[in-house]
Amino acid sequence: MASTSPPRAASSRSLASRQSSPPGATLPTTDRSSMSVPSVPATKVARQAAVVRILREHPVKSQAELAEHLARHGISATQATLSRDLVELGAQKLRRPDGTFTYDVPTDIPVPPETSTAVVRLARLAAELVVAADHSANLLVLHTPPGAAQYLGSALDAALGAKALGTVAGDDTTLTVMRSSDMAADICARILAGLPPLDE
């Protein structure tokens, strides 16, 4: 006579699974349409404009860090693409006062930053870096700690715009050629006073 074994009780795990998942039920899915990122046209011009804004507003130390900033704006770019963009934009790495190197871009590219942003940046850097300021005729001379002059020089060119012919920066000194002696005296005084917004 064959023996029969009593039926095994369903495990609590499988029972709970059947109770919580009725027939035909499906797992909830995430509505990705609500997870949007800022929309930027997928063009080279738009991408490079975003690169310029990012480099002007953030201390970017590497291409990987730049790619992360772009991703927040909905822009995807490979390292090879970013390398070409940086070369075409004339970007270069400048040493900051803390010894690190960050990307910066020239001021004469087609997508410069807003003047107000450039002036705010110069005011911040001048307060941090300028240890002495003087002027003679149409020349403005600023002294900084060692290694900081190039970083300050870039900010000077961006903020002064047409008021200056250009800035030459060494290791701890910047020399800006203003368009007139009055402008040199005015900017020197403004920098020493905290540089309020410049007139257009």
Image (cartoon, helix red, strand yellow):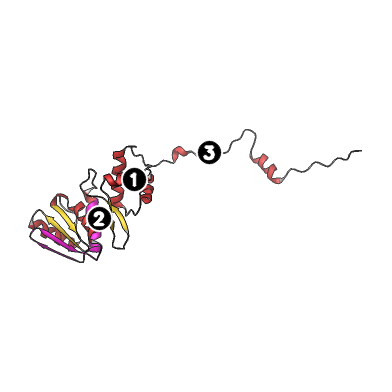
Total marks drawn?
3
Q: Which residue is painted at 35% across and 52% down in the image?
A: 62
Q: Mark 2 points at which residue?
A: 121
In the rendered image, which quarter is residue 82 located in? top left
User: In the rendered structure, which amino acid carries the disc numbered 3?
Assistant: Thr
User: In the image, which residues are magenta?
Assistant: 117-146
- Separation of marks 3 and 1 at Cα, in angstroms: 35 Å
How far across and how far down the image is residue 164, in percent?
14, 53
Judge from the rendering whether residue 179 lies leftward or rightward of residue 82; answer left or right: left
Residue 181 shown left or right of residue 20 in the figure: left
**Residues under labels 3 and 2: Cα distance?**
45 Å
Residue occupied by mark 1: 82
Say which of marks 1 and 2 sits in front. 1
* The stretch drawn in magenta includes residue 144: yes
User: Is 115 covered by the magenta stretch?
Assistant: no
Determine the CA span between mark 1 and mark 2: 25 Å
Question: Front-most of 6 and 50?
Answer: 50
Q: Residue at 51% across / 40% down in the picture?
A: 30
Q: What is the quadrant of the N terminus in the image?
A: top right
Q: Can see residue 123?
A: no
Circle 1: residue type: Leu
Residue 163 in picture, x, y percent from top left? 13, 52
Q: Looking at the image, is mark 3 or mark 1 nearer the viewer?
A: 1
Q: Which of marks 3 and 1 is nearer the N terminus?
A: 3
Q: To which residue does mark 3 refer?
A: 29
Element class at badge 3: loop
Task: Give residue 42's quadrant in the image.
Answer: top left
